[in-house]
Structures are given as C-alpha cells and as structure tokens.
Image (spheres, rainbow, N blue to C red):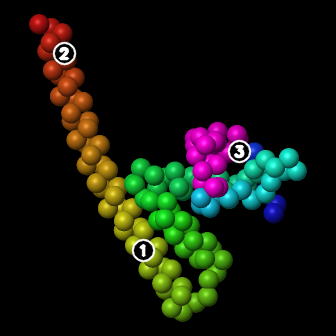
Amino acid sequence: MGDALMRIGEVAERTGLSLRTIRHYDDVGVVRPSARSQGGFRLYTEADVQRLLLIKRMKPLDFSLEEVKDLLGVLDELDAGSQGGPAREDLLRRLDEYYSSATERSVALRRKLEAAEEFAERLGAQRAQYRTD
C-alpha cells in the first residue's frame, strides 16, 4: 500500500464531508478506512478519498446507500479485471444503468434549479417594488 495515509480530519477537509458522515460510511460498510493506527485512529488512502468524493457526487442526485454500495461494488469488480464473458457484460450493463440514471437525475435537478432561480428572481423583483413604494 504505497499511498500516504491520512487521518480522518484531513480526509474531511479534502472532501468537505463531516467527520460524522465519514464515520457513518465506515459503520455501514460503504467506505472503510484502509488502515488503523496503533491507537485505533482511522487511516485513509487517496483511493479512499476518491471513493468518498464519488459518494459526495451521488448525494445531490438522491442515490440511496444501497445504490452507492452497489455502484462501488461494480466499479471495484471492473477495476479488479473481473472475469470476461457474461459476468463482465452484466457489470457493464449495471454501470450503463447508473450512468443513465445519473444523467436523468441531473436533468431533473437542473430543472429544479432553474425553477428555484426563477422564483428568486421574481421574489427579488417584488422586493424591489415594495422597497420603492
């Protein structure tokens, strides 16, 4: 394991996730620290940080923890050079499904953002109207 090990505070700072959230992901088995110090402190690698960032990107799209776990499992198996044939094809199919779902959810989120921005603009115009009265 040639990666430098980071304590949870550094990981929290790098990812923008709270200590509590990172500990929760460990407790539920989504992202386990790669090591522990002699004192029992969680130690993370760059690969662990990248997994946490992937999860962070999935959160606004409302992926469940089960979906997060499943996608991470798919990616792990593909990274490990999973056997070819039907098993690999199934992994690629599942990855395609996550890609399609992420794309659809992004479009829906963009529509919500546009509606929220329009609301804020209208509210701002009303506010300005009342301030000039």
The answer to whether 100 is drawn above or below residue 62 in the figure is: below
Instruction: Please state which amino acid type lies under the numbered disc 1.
Output: Asp
Q: Are marks 2 and 3 in contact (CB under 8 Å)?
A: no
Q: Answer yes or no: is residue 51 visible.
A: no
Q: Earlier in the sequence, mark 1 or mark 2?
A: 1
Q: Nearer the viewer, residue 41 or 47?
A: 41
Question: The magenta stretch spans which residues?
Answer: 9-27
How many badges with numbers are in the image?
3
* Residue found farthest to the bottom: 85
Task: For marks 2 and 3, give the one nearer the viewer.
Answer: 3
Return the x and y of residue 89 as percentages of the image width and height.
49, 86
Instruction: Please state which amino acid type lies under the numbered disc 3.
Output: Ile
* Residue found farthest to the left: 133
Q: Which residue is mark 1?
A: 96
Q: Earlier in the sequence, mark 3 or mark 1?
A: 3
Q: Is residue 99 left or right of residue 35?
A: left
Residue under the image location 61 percent in, 88 percent down: 83
Q: Which residue is mark 2?
A: 128
Secondary structure found at label 2: helix
Return the x and y of residue 82 as percentages of the image width and height.
62, 83
Q: Which residue is mark 3?
A: 8
State how far apart marks 3 and 1 are (Cα): 32 Å
